[in-house]
Image: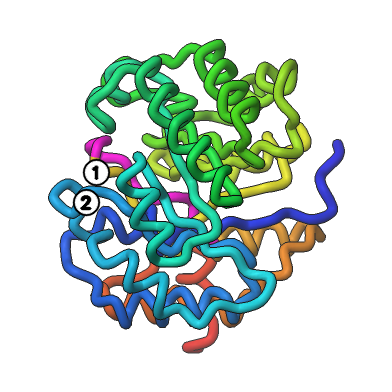
Amino acid sequence: MSFPSRVRIVEVGPRDGLQNEPQTVPVEVKVTLIEMLADAGLAAIEAGAFVSPEWVPQMAASGEVYTRIDKRPGVSYPMLVPNLKGLELALAAGVREIALFAAATETFSQKNTNCSIAQSIERFATVIDAAQAEDLRIRGYISCVLGCPYEGEVSLETVAMLARELFDRGCYEVSLGDTIGVGTPGKARAMIERLAQDSPVEKLAAHFHDTYGQALANLHAVLQCGVAVVDSSVAGLGGCPYAKGATGNVATEDVVYMLDGMGIETGVDLDKLLAAGRYISDFLGREPVSRAATALWRKRAG
C-alpha cells in the first residue's frame, strides 16, 4: 500500500463553503477567515466567485474580498469564474488564478449553468483562451463525478472526456467533485483508475462532500491511487445550491488530522486551523461540522 509523502490541500471554505449559507457573511469576516487560513499554512485558498449575485448572493462582493486580502507570498487565491463576464471582473480585481467548471451529467449542467455539456465545453474553452492570453493559471472542476441528484449514476466515460478536455485546453489541474457525497471507496478508486488511462493522476484533485459520511474513506482510497491534492472546507462548511440535501465538503480539520496520523505532510498547523474554524463557526452561530475539531475543542475544555 503506497501513499504520497505530501498532500497539497486546497481550501474551498470561503467560496464553496460560504456560497450556501443563508445569512450574509460580511466582507471583513471573509477577509479575516482567509487570512487566518493562510496563517495556518494553507497555500491555496479559494477566495470567492464572480457569479451572478441574483443566483449566488453570498459571492456578490468577491471582488472587494479579493482586493482586501493581505496576500502572502507563496499562497494562491483562485476565484471561480463561470463565463467571460466573470473573467472580466476577475481581471479588474487583479486576480491571477481562476477556476472554472463543467458538470458530468446533462441535467445538472442545465440546472447549474443553463447549458448542455457540449455547450459548457465551448463556454469554458472561450474563457480558457481569454485567460491564457492574460497569463492566468487555470484550474478545472468537474461536478457530480460519482453521482447526480437528477440522473443518479454517472458515466465515467463522460468524466474522463471532460477531464481530457480541461487538460488539453490548458488547465494545470482538474478537481473531481462528488457534489452530493454519494461516492464510496470502491467507486472513487474505479474513477481514478479510469481517468488514469488518459489523464495525469498527479494533476487530479479529490473534492469530496461528506453527505453520507464517506469522504475520508474515499480520500484514503484515491490517495492509494496516486492522488495528492485534496479540496476541503474549514469547519465542514458548504453544500451546493443546485443539489438539495448535499452537505459540506469534507472538513479540512478532519483531513489534516487523518493525514498527520498517516505521517503525510501538509504544511498545515492544526492548532491555527482549529482557530480559523472556530472563528467562522462562531460567526455563523453553530459548532464546526468537523469531528476532529469538535473532539479537540472538547478535550481542551477539559
Residue at (48, 12) in percent of width and height: 155
Q: Position of residue 42 (x, y in %)?
A: 61, 68
Residue numbers of the magenta segment = 242-252
Q: Mark 2 points at which residue?
A: 56
Q: What is the tally of numbered marks visible in this picture?
A: 2
Q: How crowded is mark 1: few (under 14 residues within 10 Å), some or many (20 or more)?
A: some
CB under 8 Å between discs 1 and 2: yes
Residue at (29, 76) in percent of width and height: 27
- Left or right position of 294 against 83: right
The image quadrant that residue 192 belongs to is top right
Tell me the CA gap for discs 1 and 2: 8 Å
Q: Residue 241 carries which label?
A: 1
Amino acid carrying label 2: it is: Val
Q: Can residue 224 be seen in this view?
A: no
Near-viewer residue (288 or 62): 62
* Circle nearer the N terminus (1, 2): 2
From the image, give the main secondary structure of the stretch colored magenta.
loop
Near-viewer residue (214 or 239): 239
